[in-house]
Amino acid sequence: MDELNSTMGQPTAYTDDDIKTLDWMEHIRRRPGMYIGKLGDGTYADDGIYVLLKEVLDNSIDEYMMGYGKSIEVTVEAGEVTVRDYGRGIPLGKVVDVSSKMNTGAKYDSKAFKKSVGLNGVGIKAVNALSSYFMVTSYRDGECKQVTYSRALVTEETEITPGDQPNGTLICFIPDKEIFKEYRYKDEHIENLLKNYVFLNSGLSIFYNGKKFYSRNGLVDLLNENMTTEPLYPIIHLKGEDIEVVVTHSNQYGEEYYSFVNGQHTTQGGTHLSAFREAVPKVIKEYYNKNFEYADIRSGIVAAISIKVEEPVFESQTKTKLGSKDVGPEGPSVAKFIGDFIKRELDNFLHKNAETSDTLLKKILDSEKERKAIAGVTKLARERAKKANLHNKKLRDCRVHLNDPKGDRTEESCIFITEGDSASGSITKSRDPNLQAVFSLRGKPLNSFGLTKKIVYENEEFNLLQAALNIEDGLDGLRYNKVIIATDADVDGMHIRLLLITFFLQFFPDLIKRNHVYILQTPLFRVRNKQKTFYCYTEEERLAAIREVGAKAEITRFKGLGEISPDEFKNFIGKDMRLDLVSMKKEDLVKEMLEFYMGKNTMERQNFIIDNLIIEEDVA
């Protein structure tokens, strides 16, 4: 044993001093990801600064859901966030406890908040701990109390004093730059968050920097806001106690769902969405009394579901996936609750609305016809994909995948889609093999606009890409959280980007709508001397670097990804890599947009190109 110890080196001491108990605020500050997910800098909608805002808003929304306060005011200015609601206000004797004592709140075994989002007494405390400045004021029955904190430590506390403000709570906070570094709130992400709140709470008004958000028609307004294709029939709107559902179909491939629990947008779905996806095709199949495939019924579906449950169980503090099996301690299962409602209400609707049911039937039959027409091609393509040695030829895989529930850090998994051996070689040598995969294209992909899904299986590049992503049957099997298009920043590279985006929009639009597709930004220039090196992504950055380096600057213009050495590439695909999200807005009607940019070469498009032509000078 002594010999073994000597070969392994000195053992590490393990003493009483190694056992530490952290204060609650120190634990949150050391492990913020456990409480708010990723940190980020405000670039993406799920970055931590938006989770802080949401945690505060959730409490205000809970007040509205319980019948108190019809408006909420939100302001964001220079990184400082203020939220004022007009609910009941925090009981004045408990303002300190609610904002700074872990596992303290009114939502334990209390009918005051029967079906709220926040149940574990953590959210507002996490905001406090992760803010350099946090102030909470409660107005209640002609009195008020205010407490101010810095990183969860009280800096000022007032006595209960008389006041003339309406009941409610005012919270102001500044996210701590020691935690979030250089962050910036983006209006578009905040506005999308607020829109979802009003869609789920008809009659609630939210004012953001003076702009009003209000919904009269609930989830119908949500679908109309998010759909980028015209519905084939008027949206079916079904409402019951603790459940609201909207359903329609469009001429797009794939399935598009929006799911919510107690007003929380469950972006990763959960038990309620699984039950909904099962219940809808089952009822439709029984209504027509036809042996339809569920996939044919779901093809092109656009739908949303919102339910309210008691004591919801989420799979993380960020509450993006519901884990609850039952709607309440004494209620039915989530699956039975949703299944019974859909069976009753959707069946009744279809019987009463013959025009809608006729249109829906035609859509299902068209999907069935297309599926059968490509059945032979599909079978051969699957066999070809299996035989193709993906791991050696097209795909350099990573060890962790999104659909592996036991995988570690799966949210960080990504795949780079590159073109050419040199570019894929550089990325492959530079990547993190645990989290980053590489798929290499051979030349330019086909322009898939206007083609049927048969082309996905007949075209080897598309077939193997689909197999690598594992999205043939929908996004449930998606193997990577981020699908990153990594092409050269020249004309050919831009064209490949467009062709890939066209492919995704045409056949897998939900991949883009659920924020999985990104463009990798790599530097255009390297400016350096013997002491300093700058990588520049814009002309402005290049000029600034030249001024910094001086007259003897060595300037390199990167013509393609293959020109960047693997050692340098590590700087551009690491934790802080620059990514542009490929996103869609309501006005981005897919069919019309693809027709204009990727359809036949019309005079209208020629004029657009001429009017927007930019000639780049050679600066090397």
Image: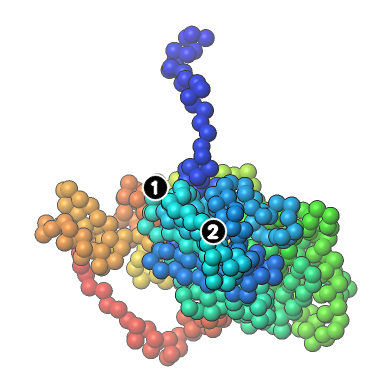
Q: Is residue 290 visible?
A: no
| For marks 1 and 2 on the same chain, the one whose residue lies earlier in the sequence | 2
As drawn, 154 above or below 163: above
Residue at numbered disc 1: 430
Residue pictured at 70% horizontal, 67% vertical: 66
Query: Circle 1 sits in a helix, a strand or a loop, which is it?
Result: helix
Query: Circle 2 sits in a helix, a strand or a loop, which is it?
Result: loop
As drawn, 284 above or below 547: below
Type of amino acid at the residue the image marks with label 2 = Ile
**Image location (x, y in percent) of residue 114:** 73, 60
As drawn, 54 above or below 607: above
Residue at numbered disc 2: 160
As drawn, 224 above or below 574: below
Relative horizontal placement of residue 105, taking residue 501 as reference (left or right): right
Q: Is residue 240 visible?
A: yes
Q: Mark 2: few, some, or many residues within 10 Å (few <14, many ≥20)?
A: some
Callout 1–callout 2 Cβ contact below 8 Å: no
Q: Which residue is outermost to the right?
A: 289
Type of amino acid at the residue the image marks with label 1 = Ser
Residue pictured at 56% horizontal, 44% vertical: 408
